[in-house]
Image (cartoon, rainbow, N blue to C red):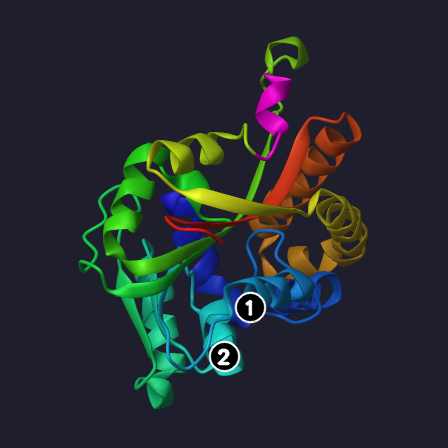
Amino acid sequence: MHDFYDAFYAVVPHSRAHHDICTAVFGLDLCQHGFADMAQLALLLDVTGLNATHCALDLGCGNGMITEWLADQSGAHITGLDFIPVAIRQAEERTAAKSARLSFVVGDINRLALPHRAFDVIISIDSLYFSDDYNATIHALDAALRPGGRLAILYSHGREPWVPKEEFPAASLAPDGTPLAAALQANGFTFQTWDLTAQEYALARRREEVLAACEAQFEAEGTTFIYNNRMGDARGIRQAIEEGLHVRYLYHATKGDI
């Protein structure tokens, strides 16, 4: 996975094909690597109430384009963390003029060394999947939250193609039954959820359509590996949702009442 993202961020700033895909599917090119369109990002801002008084962490920020957009919209001071050094360099170079409220750091979700009680809000947008131990990751994030702080996590869960349907635990699709929910509960969080499965299905179908129309463009760029990855994701998610074995939620979690 590290090799894929090294290669991805090396070429994506110059990829017109990827720019066109993000714009057509998500509404704006923020170098999305998951299924967070502008409506989902707007929902995240609304749910968290992120504003200029807040210090926030964007866990798994990639090259920071979503981080920058969130900061521009809210005025919040945001630190972006990602495990790909070239992505962090791109973020720092692009946002140098905004360094008073935007900072970026290389870090590993499985070896988090976050400042204690530093953040009002911690955001994770399709990044928690890189954690080897959800309980340990949520515990580390908890330690980095200020009293009354909140987690906002865009998260999908479902049957992977290699898992037989009869072996997949359907109960884990409920908002309080996912692996993430279990980790939040184990660490003493309460949470609200917003079901975004229908939106994810529409985005998966849209991504398939747009990618198919742009395949030759990826081939001409020499970025077919991006096309293959994005098309595989879209097809797999669409099929799993059609089988009733895939869900997407926004989790808003805190230690107190929400």
The one nearer the camera, 107 or 151, is 151
**Is 242 covered by the magenta stretch?**
no
Does residue 133 sit above or below 192 in this rendering? above
**Residue at 33% in and 33% down:** 135
Q: Residue 126: percent from the left, percent from the top? A: 51, 49
Q: Is residue 138 left or right of residue 151?
A: left
Q: Residue 112: percent from the left, percent from the top? A: 23, 49
Asked if residue 233 can be seen in this view, the reply is yes
Asked whether disc 1 touches disc 2, contact meaning CB atoms under 8 Å apart, the reply is yes
Q: State how many labels appear.
A: 2
**Residue at 29% in and 49% down:** 142
Does residue 106 sit above or below 4 in this rendering? below
Residue linked to disc 1: 45
Q: Residue 74 shows which numbered tag?
A: 2
Q: Residue 243: percent from the left, percent from the top? A: 77, 25
Asked if residue 31 can be seen in this view, the reply is no
The residue lying furthest to the top in this view is 166
Q: Residue 164: percent from the left, percent from the top? A: 63, 12
The residue lying furthest to the front in this view is 257
**Is 170 covered by the magenta stretch?**
yes
Q: Quadrant of residue 57?
A: bottom left
Q: Residues within 10 Å of mark 1 (few under 14, many from 20)?
A: some
Span highlighted in magenta in the image: 169-175
